[in-house]
Each structure stands twice: as structure tokens, then as C-alpha cells.
């Protein structure tokens, strides 16, 4: 399980910029029976956990010696720096199912691409699922090696989900499909008639030479 340490904060408003300057990341934790709490995280530690855990893995958050299980619910990034500037963490109960979107990881080589020249279209990049916190997968693998023809598809119902995990969208939703690669159309350009251009230039020159001088 991923871990983060947090400190309670009473600094709000524009003053939180001072926290960010000192390597602290303002955050809010909520979702339990207790009221939401304003906290700070270590920015470097949070970025590392975000990269490894994403938004679908349980994070054990320690606040003043007390530990709670949380999910990263939302991360706000600076428009210029693209660095995290605020985080919402959601407290989960181990005995209650939660719904999250889990990333799909495509694996294998599709014969329809290698042998028939088709193209793989990834319709879904995340799968909405429901599961107990302890059963939440970090990602879900999608094996494309069974795509043999130019009309092959992988449906949600074809995915092998871990035990205790169920998709919350229809089983006949398309995850990925093979389509026939379109041939690039090259437009034929008519050859340039150099003689016509030469004649046109000559006629224009004669016209200019024969024109009366402007007063």
C-alpha cells in the first residue's frame, strides 16, 4: 500500500502560496464521518505517489499519528508550471464498495495489424469499475493478441477482471477494435505549362511598354 504523511494546517486563502514556496502542498481530506480537514503534504513525496498510485490505488494517509485509507480524488495543476497546487483526498471504508476509473494497459501484438496491415483503435482508455478498496487494481490489462481480422473487437465483457472487481458499464461496450488502414490519397497535380506563362509575361510587357505615360 502507498503511504503519505500529512500535517494539519490553519493557513488558508492566498497565504497558501507561502506553503508551496516551502515545498508543501495544500490539500483537503474528506469523506469520513469526521468533518473535512485542511492539511499539507510534502510536494515531492506526493508527486512520487501520484505517479505510482494514480487515482485508483489506496493510499494510507497519516495525520498526527492517525491513519486513514484514502484515494486521490482530484489534483489541481498550475496553468503555467503544470505542478500540483492543490489535492482532494477521499477517505474510504474497507467494507464499502467504491467506484473508480482504472487505466487500461494494452498488451500483445494483434495479428490483424502485423499481417493484414490494420490499425488498432483504442475506444476506452479507462474502465469504470466497482470494488472493495482492498480489491482495487492499479490498472487492467487488455490483451490484443486475439485480434485476428479487420473487423475484430474487444468488448468490456471480454476483459479478464480481477476477483472482486466488476465493470459498471455495459458488457457490450467496445474497448478496442481493428479497422482497415486507409490508403493515403495522393492528388495528381497538373504539369505547369511554362510556355503559357512565358507568353503571358510577354503580352504583359508589351502592354506596359505601349501604355501612355501617366500625367
Image: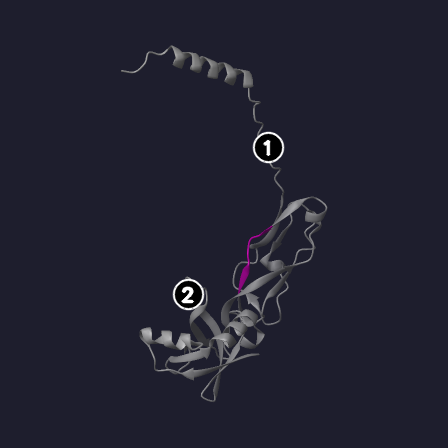
Q: Which mark is residue 78?
A: 2
Q: Tell me: residue 2, above or below residue 201.
A: below
Q: Specify whether 169 is left or right of 108.
A: left
N-term-proximal mark, 2 vs 1: 2
Q: Tell me: residue 23, above or below residue 129.
A: below
Q: Which residues are magenta?
A: 121-128
Residue 211: image x %, image y %?
35, 12
Image quarter in which the N terminus is found:
bottom right
The residue at the point 71 percent across, 50 percent down is 111
Q: Tell me: residue 10, above or below residue 155.
A: below
The residue at the point 54 percent across, 73 percent down is 48
Residue, disc 1: 186
The residue at the point 47 percent across, 17 percent down is 201
Q: Nearer the viewer, mark 2 or mark 1?
A: 2
Image quarter in which the C terminus is found:
top left
Residue 49: image x %, image y %?
53, 74
Q: Is residue 27 magenta?
A: no
Amino acid at each position: 500500500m502507498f503511504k503519505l504523511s500529512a500535517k494539519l494546517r490553519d493557513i488558508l486563502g492566498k497565504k497558501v502560496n507561502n506553503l508551496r514556496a516551502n515545498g508543501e502542498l495544500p490539500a483537503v481530506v474528506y469523506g469520513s464521518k469526521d468533518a473535512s480537514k485542511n492539511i499539507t503534504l510534502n510536494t515531492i513525496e506526493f508527486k512520487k505517489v501520484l505517479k505510482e498510485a494514480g487515482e485508483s490505488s489506496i493510499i494510507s494517509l497519516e495525520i498526527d499519528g492517525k491513519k486513514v485509507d484514502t484515494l486521490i480524488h482530484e489534483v489541481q495543476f498550475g496553468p503555467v508550471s503544470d505542478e500540483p497546487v492543490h489535492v482532494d483526498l477521499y477517505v474510504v471504508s474497507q467494507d464499502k464498495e467504491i467506484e473508480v476509473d482504472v487505466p487500461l494497459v494494452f498488451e500483445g501484438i494483434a495479428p490483424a495489424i502485423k499481417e493484414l496491415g490494420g490499425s488498432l483503435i483504442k475506444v476506452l482508455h479507462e474502465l469504470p469499475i466497482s470494488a472493495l478498496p482492498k480489491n482495487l487494481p492499479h490498472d487492467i490489462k487488455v490483451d490484443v493478441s486475439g485480434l485476428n481480422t479487420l473487423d475484430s473487437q474487444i468488448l468490456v465483457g471480454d476483459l479478464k477482471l480481477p476477483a472482486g472487481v466488476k465493470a459498471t458499464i455495459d458488457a457490450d461496450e467496445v474497448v478496442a477494435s481493428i479497422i482497415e488502414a486507409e490508403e493515403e490519397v495522393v492528388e495528381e497535380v497538373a504539369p505547369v505549362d511554362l510556355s503559357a506563362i512565358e507568353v503571358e509575361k510577354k503580352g504583359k510587357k508589351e502592354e506596359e511598354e505601349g501604355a501612355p505615360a501617366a500625367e
